[in-house]
Image: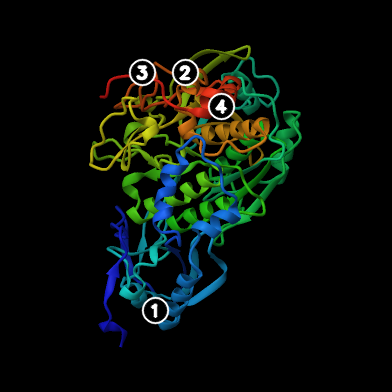
Amino acid sequence: MTSARKFNVISGSERQPVRGARLIHNAHPDQVIEISLRLRPKSGAKHRELRSAIENPNYKHMSRTDFENAHGADPADLDQIKKFAQEYGLKVHETGTELARRTVLLSGTASNLEKAFHVELKEYSHPKGNFRGRVGTISVPADYADIVTGVFGLDNRPQAEPHFRRSPQPAAGFKAHTATASHDPNEVAQIYDYPPGDGTDQCIGIIELGGGFQLDDLSNYFSSLNINPPQVISFSVDGGANSPSTPDSADGEVMLDIEVAGAIAPAAKIVVYFAPNTDRGFLDAITTAVHDSANQPSVISISWGAAESQWTPQALTNFDEAFQAAAAMGVTVCAASGDNGSSDGVNDGSNHVDFPASSSFALGCGGTTLQASNGQIVNETVWDNLPAGGGATGGGVSDSFPLPTWQDGLGVPQPSVQGGGRGVPDVSGDADPATGYNILVDGQNLVFGGTSAVAPLWAALVARINQQMGKPVGFLNPLIYAQAVETSGFHDITQGNNGSFSAAQGWDPCTGLGSPDGARLLAALTGKAAAGAERSSRARKPAA
């Protein structure tokens, strides 16, 4: 009876086959699968207008309650989805369904889901692990097409990679490091002249798609630095869990994130949102963190990502809207720009940038090689060790997100496709494993680098800035591109390249505006120039 109904394709839902995957068989028809539906905001056109409002430096942040009331999903739309679910033998879960997140948690058999969304679900083998996948588009009955903006979870292929690099050199312990090139995270904060503070009254959210931490490791690590261990809370999303195993696993990512952020802002509450490494798990972790009214993170650190070309357009759009919601509520999102240079690890001869760092509402965090002595910068260049078989900072120009107004006139290179133009990264910091961070992982003292370290490095700086300002700085991007901040709050990196792009005076597609001069950045953000943030006429690099 339902086969004659008209179905409409969900815009941007098309999935490509996974390279190297081999079809095993069709998904078992009785297999029960959980998925997440994203619904339209009830504010409609006003939600679209929110984008430009947020970019105004004088924008007043909304509370989480006010945002839900204004821009959450409409209860009437949820009622329609319940009707749709009943028609196709699907179950709506009250836990996991939230109007603020515009998310509905559904479950059903593979057979019923295939009928409801006009897809074929199949099982595949792959060197990185077996997965359930689909190829092509997702459709819904025309009656509901205007309500649903994204469907996530039918396909559970691995979506992202952690952006950390392990140095072959052993850590020399956690006391004084005068004879080594590696640093304790709090030492890096001192080198970058972070403003005073410990993150009191702040909450740092960290997104993790695998791995875990051990409390004994954290206790031993922070004790070795003579720092009181921060409060660290594990938060499960979509069945993700704190699952530590070995130093060679994603534990390295988890511990790097926690220990960098915690060493610099030890009084901040750190909430680690564990989710499966799928586009559904990643998105649900982000929306959960952004709308977490209990813990209320004021800054979120993300060290996982993948080239824009590896994402569906529906994922890019819904992630970007989640980051827009964060900006509206005064939550800063810091995202690593990737460790594979200007190609972002895609071997097609073209340049690529990493997502979610390329979202206009994320602070893209690139990497440098930091040489310091006696707490002072001796030399700082673009992190680029790709020719020697190592990593390099990601950076370039988005093919998915347009040039933001706050990057206009900076000489951002032209995008390769129409509709792109957003320059990545925005900022940078020490990421070279050769000058990396001393970390304790599963009982082992190791040195880690990668742009993964830069996201929590900046998140901790934001926590200190928020503490000093007595309020969240929120969406940092328009503020840091204001002239007074841009010229005084950063160490401009002018040497090195990441493949196709070279460092230059001012913003560049390797290290953005540069590494932080923390105290001067805070002073500029609290000064009248940053408060007004109007652009005065100034010399800019010519467009490439």
| Residue that label 4 marks | 525
Front one among 175 and 360? 360
Residue 487 circle label: 2
Front one among 41 and 287? 41
| Residue that label 3 marks | 504
Does label 1 or label 2 sit earlier along the sequence? Answer: 1
Give the SS element for disc 2.
helix
Could you tell me residue 421's position as x and y percent? Answer: 30, 36
Query: Can you say which quadrant of the picture contains the N terminus?
Result: bottom left
Label 1 crowd bin: few (<14), some (14–19), many (20+), radius 10 Å: many
Q: Relative to 9, is 306 above or below?
A: above
265 on left or right of 273: right
Does label 4 or label 3 sit earlier along the sequence? Answer: 3
Give the alpha-carbon distance from disc 1 to disc 2, as whole Å.
58 Å
Mark closer to the observer (4, 1) = 4
Could you tell me residue 428's position as x and y percent? Answer: 48, 27
